[in-house]
Image (cartoon, rainbow, N blue to C red):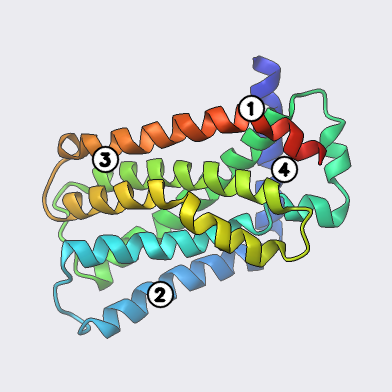
Amino acid sequence: MNIFWQASFRIAEKDLRTEFRRSYEVLSILTFSVGSILICSFAWGGGGVVEPEVAGAALWIILFFASILAFTTSFTREADRGTLGGLKTLPCSPLAILFGKIIYGTMLLFFVECVLIPFSIIFLNLDLSGRFPDLLFVCLLGAVGLSFAGSFVSGLVMFSEGKTLLLSFLLIPICMPVLLPSVMATKEIIGGSGITEVVPELRLLTAFLLLITAIMVLTFEFVLEE
């Protein structure tokens, strides 16, 4: 098990170094996210109070499209550069490779969230009143769910011709079990609820993570070989 996690974290570290070395990709994701919040702010009156339902939905729609930008290069970069064969020769299971990509995706999305949420508070006039850690926890759990789904789908489509377009189409239905409870939990927290009041939504997210983990354990070895 130690070898499994050591390999996963090394793969995630390698991907993060590559991502931040070519900083234009990270900057493009941040520019899209912050720019979308600014557009929403201007579209909704530029200074008025935004309803919790609208703010929660806007936040997660932006994060979803940011995740598409992030996961487009997850496995595709390995296939295009011919480094996938090197990953296969590592003394670890295919699942360790996948979990390395999931850790990379989670950390990248969480970094985007840490930049996006303060901008959302400022430009959408959100009053969290000490509930910022609760919102950050919900966003982290949602980022984990998006990373599980996005990394798995990225592995599925990495050998296809229109992989970028196919990734976008497949992520929409697969990420719905993540997006719906995340939006509901975010809406409740922005509206004044605490973390204990969004436990049902967090249970739905956890159930999705368990389900997709079971699917990945059963299938990803064949996905990587194909």
Hey, what amino acid is under mark 1?
Answer: Leu
Disc 2 to disc 1, C-alpha distance:
38 Å
Hey, what amino acid is under mark 4?
Answer: Lys
| Element type where label 1 sits in the image | helix
Disc 3 to disc 2, C-alpha distance:
26 Å
Disc 4 to disc 3, C-alpha distance:
33 Å
| Element type where label 2 sits in the image | helix
Q: Quadrant of residue 86?
A: top right
Hey, what amino acid is under mark 3?
Answer: Glu
Q: Is residue 209 above or below residue 175?
A: above
| Element type where label 3 sits in the image | helix
Q: Which label number is shown at residue 89? A: none
The residue at which mark 1 appears reads as 218
Q: Quadrant of residue 62?
A: bottom left
Hey, what amino acid is under mark 2?
Answer: Ser
Q: Look at 23% across and 81% down and name the residue there.
A: 44
Q: Which label number is shown at residue 36? A: 2
- C-beta proximity under 8 Å, tags 4 and 3: no
- C-beta proximity under 8 Å, tags 3 and 2: no
